[in-house]
Amino acid sequence: MQFRCVLEAPTAAAQKADESSLTYLNKGQLYGISIMDTSSSDAFYSTTLRIAFHEDSHRKSASTYWNFWLNQQENPRAARAIELDKAGSIGVLSAENRRFDRVTFQWQGQRGAKVMIRFNCLSTDFSRIKGVKGIPLRIHIDTHEALSSDSSGLSASIGQVIERCYARIKLFRDKGAERKNKDDLRHLDKMWEKQKAKLALNGSSTAAQQQQLNEFRNTFAPVQEATLFCEYTLTGDECDNEEPVIIDDSWPAGAASIQTAGSFESPGSSLATPADILAPNKRQFSPSSLSSTGLTGTLGPNNVELVGVDPTYVPMPRKRKAVLVIYVHFQGENIYRAVYLEQLTVEDLVAKLAQRLEMQTNAADVEVVRRTKKGLTVKVDDSVVAQLEEEQDMEVECSFAADSGALTIYLNY
């Protein structure tokens, strides 16, 4: 590869050796990405760095997914899924962040560049269904030769793409990336011990056991301190099956529209809005079309008559969003239930578990204890709850004291 691109974050602890590298990142945290021209050319380059969907099936529906994400933002027009911190970047001659899903910057080959990037979305932000695994994402980099520059320093003309590369990522909230790596390491250690015990029971020779253990170890890629981007080798029309997404800047503030390149339409045309795409069968109308004299009827989409519409109606604000989901298995049940925490506290955990159990209880009178797989008993406080992994599964048992009736909740995981 002519350009060496490196993401300054360690690769995931548990990943197959035959797969491209995977890196866990935190939403809102700055990460450095360095790019170097191995030919040490004195040419100027224009590089576009964007966040994209990794799997082809998701890239084909990119516009729909991004419309959904934008609809969840307070100001869709100003929302940015990726941002460049120019103050912390090195070797960047000029930069722009006009598109919500990408940044473009110029740099010189001899000097190289390092950009500080922040991601403002999660892998789980693209679905209405909570508790599901996030959509696989990637950082995609296209580097062009800069042919000329305008007065602002940005490239007014760029040549063909010289090289493409990418790195697989998964985005977590808070310090979820670190927690995920620790959990993966613990899982690998358990797999390693099970494999050793299994081979010992087979009665194989020491040399044969060691060979099989080495083969097992080699199925996983070793952790790297930094993530090296992989070359994207497809060329021509098939080089990227993702729908190019565009925000129509002529829409009023607070509104956003995404469309595929080559199908741009004005706001006054029949282009579907994000709400149309995500809920195509939903009946919509404009309150301004109603009479100001009171309740009245009007015609909605497809000439459906809406009767008794109150133009003064204000929707109730939504409940607070959950910050963590765990899966719990209660005694006597053969399924796991999703429990959504709005706060990383014991009080909220007890309240949500009691709600699932249809119990009336006071969190202050309940003791929560964790039983580890090593047989340890740990009192659960707010710090333990804060360290819970996203989508952690556990078994829950409830015990009432015979004398006082005090409730103790045991979490087995």
Image (tube, rainbow, N blue to C red):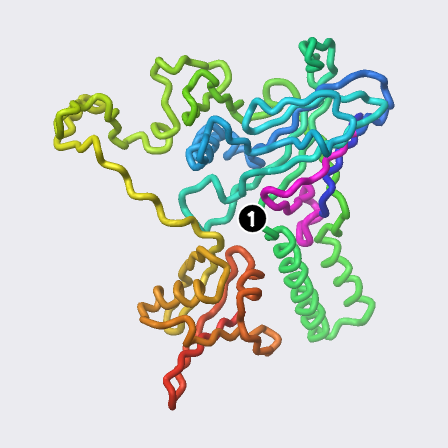
Q: Position of residue 204 (x, y in %)?
A: 76, 71
Q: Position of residue 315 (x, y in %)?
A: 28, 39
Q: Amino acid at mark 1?
A: Arg
Stretch in magenta: 11-35
Image quarter in which the C terminus is found: bottom right
**Residue 189 visible in rendering:** yes
Instruction: Say which residue appears at 69% left-offset and 15% top-offset.
Output: 154
In the rendered structure, does residue 343 fall within the stretch colored magenta?
no
Q: Is residue 361 left or right of residue 131?
A: left
**Residue 1 visible in rendering:** no
In the rendered image, the vertical position of residue 260 relative to residue 197, given as above or below: above
Q: Circle 1 sits in a helix, a strand or a loop, which is it? A: loop
In the rendered image, the vertical position of residue 318 relative to residue 391, given as above or below: above
Q: Position of residue 103 (x, y in %)?
A: 63, 26
Q: Is residue 366 left or right of residue 285?
A: right
Instruction: Say which residue appears at 58% left-offset and 73% top-offset.
Output: 372
Instruction: Say which residue appears at 53% left-offset and 69% top-offset.
Output: 381
Q: Is residue 170 left or right of residue 277?
A: right
Q: Is residue 65 left or right of residue 192?
A: left
Of residue 152 and residue 134, the one placed in the foreground of this image is 152
Instruction: Say which residue appears at 61% left-offset and 29% top-offset.
Output: 50
Residue found at the far bottom of this picture: 403
**Rendered image quadrant of residue 170:** top right
In the rendered image, the vertical position of residue 225 relative to residue 191, given as above or below: above
Image quarter in which the N terminus is found: top right
Of residue 325 and residue 28, the one placed in the foreground of this image is 28
Q: Position of residue 398 (x, y in %)?
A: 41, 76
Residue denoted by label 1: 173
How would you rate the neighbour count of disc 1 (Cα within 10 Å): few for under 14, some for 14-19, many for 20 or more? some
